[in-house]
Image: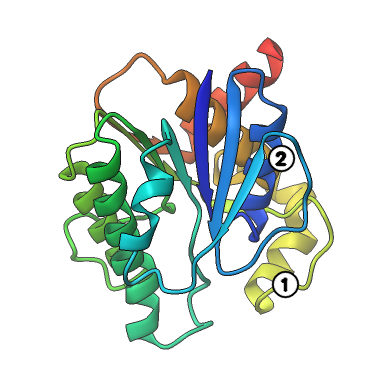
Amino acid sequence: MKRMVIVGASGMVGGYALRYALDHPAVAAACTIGRKTTGLMHRKLKEVVHQDFADCSALAGTLADQDAAVFCLGTYTGAVPDAELRRITVDYTVEFARVLRVSNPNATFAFLSGSGADPTGRSRMAFARYKGEAENALAAAGFPRVYMFRPAYIYPVQPRREPNFSYRLLRAIYPAFRVLFPNQVIRADDLARTMVDVAVRGTGEGRTLVLENRDIRHLALNSSERD
């Protein structure tokens, strides 16, 4: 039985991850950390409100009890200025990982990265560079197991207000897009379920594992068949 912390549970993927964690037979307790609570009530659930992710020192006591972290905190490109995008994508991730590693050096870390993440830092896309930088930091942090999830287009499943025109277009053409390019799409619930399942069960592979969209789809299928 594992104790799991989910960061970003008020977001789309994090919200599904929380629900799957609460239902997962191998998860004894789930803890959310965010700037607000989710509003859910469950016997397994504990919610911690934390406003400043630039300094996670106050979370040390909470994180000492966690066996695995599913980190889904993030924002959309264009939603914030570049400096803020980097702060959220890189600085907040690194700071949380630092405190988790000190508090529980045996914890597993599952990170919501993105397709095209570039650990070399050469990409012209800020999102790709920053996700790659965060991946590099996590790989070097010393966790026994780190999983970098790189989904392509994440289909929302439930209706929502899309953040920009590109997402509105992708949602509209999703039925055809998933047939023509199945390895370029993943349902938000499938992605979340896979992140939770991998964080709990592992994959039997190396200490640091990058999971591209194709890999996530494969694991999601296996997970649904096992369930």
Where 36 sits versus 136, above or below? below
- Amino acid on which disc 1 is placed: Glu
Is 96 on the left or on the right of 25, as rendered?
left
At which x and y percent is residue 135? 27, 51
- How far across and down, in percent of the image, does residue 99 sit? 28, 52
In-image side of 118 versus 110 (left or right): left
Three-letter code, disc 2: Arg
From mark 1 to mark 2, how far is it between C-alphas? 22 Å
Q: Is residue 74 above or below residue 223?
A: below
Instruction: Indicate the secondary structure of the residue bearing disc 1.
Output: loop
**At 55% across and 26% down in the image, what residue appears?**
197
- Pick out the residue farthest to the right: 159
The quadrant where residue 128 appears: bottom left
Q: Which mark is residue 19?
A: 2
Residue in the image at 72% along x and 55% along y: 156
Which disc number belongs to residue 162?
1
**Crowd around label 1: few <14 · some 14–19 · many ≥20 (10 Å):** few
Q: What's the mark number on residue 69?
A: none
